[in-house]
Image: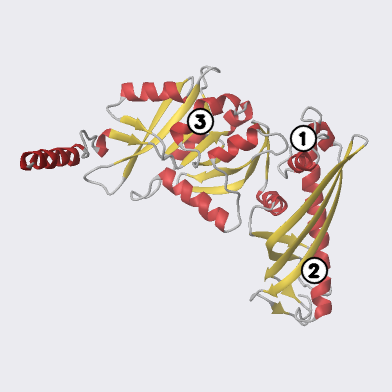
Amino acid sequence: MKRRAQLSGLLLIICLVLTACWDQRPLEDMALIAGIGIDPYPESPNLMNFSLVYPLYLPDRRQGEKIELIAADNLGQAITVFERQNARQFAGGKVRVVVFGEDAARQGLEGLIDYVQVPTIDDTALVAVAERAYDLWNVQLPETERIAFQIQGMLRNAHREGNTLRITMGELITEASAFGVDAVVPVLKVLDQWRIQVDGAALFRDMQMVDTVTQDELNLLMALRNRIGEVSIVANVGVSDILCKPVVEISLIAPKPRIKPRLENGQLRVKVDFSARYVLNSYDAIADLTEPDATDALTRALESYLLIEMSRLVTKLQELRVDPLGVGKTLRAQNPKQFDPMQYREQWAQAQVDLSVDLHLTRAGTLNRNHSQRP
């Protein structure tokens, strides 16, 4: 019995030892890919330029990174070429950001999605469009910064501040392949060799980028998509008895668009009731905006401005036959028998859209300056 107990104890110890690492790969031998850029290969229409960004762990610097540019048919082939050319092993699954060059995005993502292989690069990676993805990685940052991490943080902060949409690789693939809703992807612009900024967004029709919207149009689009809690708007409402300067900066709080599409004899009719609370951030007022009459007059002026600008945006979307508002998705959910994906684009382009705007002032900002007369 004692011998059996000793043997059991020995087997237990062996099992505990076997659970430890049998092998290890030093961190320095792995390429932990943080960013992937995709551009067309200029010398062959059948190849893509994959720029792979990964951090280096150097003894003489706090941080560093390397950019590998590889021409290949798809990401799988790019990985094979990368590992043949380097002693490092490709390590995906923690990619921070994927950037599509504008020319590649305009060619269409159908093949690119096959190239990207989501299980390899993680479907939570943020997505952006740039004029040329490779140029984005070459922006000079301080030694303690890494460009892919910097871009990820920039997109997250811009989303929290209400300046752009947040879209992941998984969401892009879902919206690009689903009927009734189209993807909107932030556009990153290189200002110079030291600076990058978010500058509007790219509009997709299914899997192909077709156009862009400005930053002001993007702010209106975000409010109409109902995917953000606060949106900043700069409104030009004109000089009046209330204001001595025409420009007013406001924040739309908890915007609530109610989209109600219906088909009548093949004609698509869409009613959009938009409502939101708003905060006056910056304005120059003649009247006292604590008075109800003055507040109501300014609110009506802001409603008129938003109605005009949102109508222009919707018209642009219809002309492009893109539906980032998800009108088709709502129609398909409410009336699946009426929704025809083969005819919907044309129905949306010819749709009659009735838009209404209802605002309610929450509070005036601290930048109010009352003037006894206009300057």
Q: Is residue 178 left or right of residue 270?
A: left
**In the image, residue 107 lies at what x, y percent?**
62, 26
Identify the residue shown where x is 52% and y is 17%.
Answer: 44
Q: CA distance from mark 1 to mark 2?
A: 32 Å
Q: Is any part of residue 13 visible from this angle?
A: yes
- Crowd tier of the residue under label 2, counting other residues whose Cα lies within 10 Å: few below 14, some 14–19, many 20 or above: some
Q: Secondary structure at mark 3?
A: strand
- Crowd tier of the residue under label 1, counting other residues whose Cα lies within 10 Å: few below 14, some 14–19, many 20 or above: many
| Amino acid at dot 2 | Thr
Identify the residue shown where x is 23% and y is 37%.
Answer: 26
| Amino acid at dot 1 | Arg
Q: Which residue was labeled with disc 2?
A: 299
Which badge, 3 or 1, is on the more N-terminal residue?
Answer: 3
How many numbered discs, if any? 3
Identify the residue shown where x is 24% and y is 34%.
Answer: 25
Q: Secondary structure at mark 1?
A: loop
Q: CA distance from mark 3 to mark 1?
A: 26 Å
**Residue 321, numbered circle:** 1
- Viewer-proximal residue, 145 or 32? 32
**In the image, residue 176 lies at what x, y percent?**
64, 34
**Residue 38, numbered circle:** 3
- Viewer-proximal residue, 271 or 11? 11
Q: Is residue 237 left or right of residue 156?
A: right
Instruction: Give the number of the mark in front: 3 or 1.
Output: 1
